Amino acid sequence: MLSLIDERYNFAFLDEGSKREIRRKTLKAVAIPGYQVPFASRELPIARGWGTGGLQLTLSLIGPKDVLKVIDQGSDDSVNAVSIRHLVENTAGIATTEETGEATIIQTRHRIPEQPLRENQILVFQVPLPEPLRVIEPREEITRRQHAEMDYSSMWLSLYEDIVHWGVVTVSHSYPCIAHGRYLFSPSPIPRWDIPKLNHAECLYLFGAGREKRIYAIPPYTDVLPLSFEDYPFEVESFVGRACCKCGSSDTFLNEIFDEASGQKIYQCSDTAFCKKRQREREI
Amino acid sequence: MGYVTVTGGKEAIVSANRLIRFYRLKDAAVPLDVKEIQSQMRLMIDRVMGEGGLYAPEYAAIALKQAEGDIAEAAFLLRAYRSTLPRSHYSLTVEPAQMRLIRRISSAFKDIPGGQMLGPTYDYTHRLIDFALTNENEDDIAAFIKDFRQEMDDAEQMPTFSKVIDVLRSEDLMDGMPESHAEATPFDVTMESLSFPAPRSARLQLLARGETGAMVALAYSSMRGYGAVHPTIGELRVGFVSVYIPYPFSDQAEGMPIYIGEILLTEVEIINSFAENKTADKARFSMGYGLCFGHNEPKAIAMAILESSLETQGTAPVQDQEFVLMHIDSVEANGFVSHLKLPHYVTFQSSLDRIRQTRNQPGKEEIDVIADRREV
């Protein structure tokens, strides 16, 4: 692997001026929960759309004493998580971990860890499409105005049309939520399973979209409510009657896997660190 | 083997990285010399610098070697490297009118002040594969270069020429320079996130580092009828311009600007139909402007067309700022399209849940397919 430990590169890759800008924009994002703050967005050695927004947040936040965990689809060992973790290790030389409880900063794609996060932890999301209204309105000029006027009628209407047409809301992931009674935001493509974890959490949630050049945040103890109707309440994914084939958990988000040997469908925790911990606790 | 296995991602990456090195070198008789790439792959270097947004011919050559000749990948390497550099100075505005020219043509006038100068162009070559290049040897090259240099020494030093467009301006047939914009500090797309409608300086910057193929395709759509711009090239020039920075050790502009080197640029000025020029007090042509790093004529022409097109009103894609400016960046477009290769099984699991729930609704058994509209 290409080694970047090289005096021609700054600590944590980005130059200090860029990091300062990202931290300033992050502070603004924390001050206005759910509001998408534009930022300049640097190019990084990993591709746009592969986690550069989250990575810029991570690189601008970490200091020499931080401990980083990186997950993709809940897994520490997913190739993109490994690649991002290597980049931070090689350019900052900081400690990394797979234990959710040990990390000070966790960068994630598509999941929130099962283990609740604490006050001194930050979860950094990689966000592909920060604009929740984009599926309805392609033009940024219009959606900015809709946010300014808190005009979310088009999103409500789209959910209503879903129910009329399909009988359920068909939005599977990236479920639109309201932050603290004001801004509609995209929680990134996490499953609906993870949405309740956003509400009144102890930790800070930061969202970075590199290609779209936006940062937003859900600070600790913020109201986060998914859009729903009184007679059609918000639903998380159902795993009724299923359990993880490795640790036996029936209260986690499960991936279904086809077992080649038996030809059967089996289930496994998406959060691999949590699964391993459960296995240890149950001495499996 | 699993796409994302519970363990093994680390080993897989290490192996993949060794494999690309192996594939790059397995049939190599000699390693490619970076200097040779830089000097013999001139136009590829120029594209990489232009799309990477960094004028660094040697680094572009290293990037091309590293990327096995993939232009998008090489431009991406330069962009990423750019992020590690502090912004120390802004140059003074370069002056293409003072360009040390290697090529200069006009399609608007047969005779232009100073004359047309074809320069190094493939435009009038016959596109026949030259099989003799297979056996090009060092003696042939040395003899050709020696003869050519001798002829060049006899020729006059190339003077600088005034702009063709100024001829039309002097007759008041062309829009003048917008006075108000002459000294304004430009928007910097590398330091600020864009908002719409974008200022012209931001539009020009994004076009200047856009992807050549994407821009040519969009410009072509305007010329074919999806838009209002089908111009005449007033002037196309390729040459070297000097770059100066303000004297850095004085708050007053006392010191002389400091010369830091010269860069090769392609500049295009197009003349647009006066019928589209709605702001003029009388019939006047409007100008479109293209400027990019290196020798890259298709890109500079496409840029001039697109920036003109964005000044017109209409429903064509190339008249929509967001449509054009958000989709021509090589690094962004390639990054997002290629991210589809990442695992998506959490989101897809979530979609499976919805299709099953939808099927389970009473009276909806006939529904077989649901297209998820937000796969990300």
Image (cartoon, coloured by chain):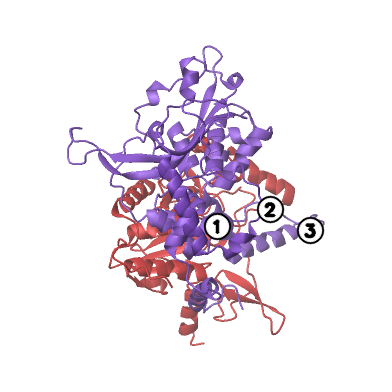
Chain colours: A red, B purple
CB under 8 Å between callouts 2 and 3? no
The quadrant of the image that shows the N terminus of chain B is: bottom right
Compared with residue A277, is residue A142 higher up or lower down, i.e. above or below?
above
Disc marking residue A108: none
Compared with residue B330, is residue A137 higher up or lower down, i.e. above or below?
above
Query: Which residue in the structure is indicated by mark 2?
Result: A168
Look at label 1 and name its amino acid.
Pro
Mark 3 crowdedness (10 Å alpha carbons): few <14, some 14-19, many ≥20: few
Disc marking residue B368: 3
The residue nearer to you, when weighing B269 against B67, is B269
> Can residue A64 be seen in this snapshot?
yes
Seen as rendered, the residue at the extreme top is B282
Q: Is circle 3 on the same chain as circle 1?
A: no
Mark 2 crowdedness (10 Å alpha carbons): few <14, some 14-19, many ≥20: many
For the residue labelled by badge 1, is the local secondary structure a helix, a strand or a loop? loop
Compared with residue A25, is residue B175 higher up or lower down, i.e. above or below?
above
The quadrant of the image that shows the C terminus of chain B is: bottom right
Query: Which residue in the structure is indicated by mark 1?
Result: A189
Task: Read off the chain for label 1.
Answer: A
Look at label 2 and name its amino acid.
Val
In terms of image quadrants, where is residue A256? bottom right
The residue nearer to you, when weighing A72 against B61, is B61
First-in-chain label (1 vs 2): 2
State the residue at coordinates (55%, 37%). Answer: B301
For the residue labelled by badge 2, is the local secondary structure a helix, a strand or a loop? loop
Left or right: B79 with respect to B127?
A: left
Look at label 3 and name its amino acid.
Asp
State the residue at coordinates (45%, 20%). Answer: B176
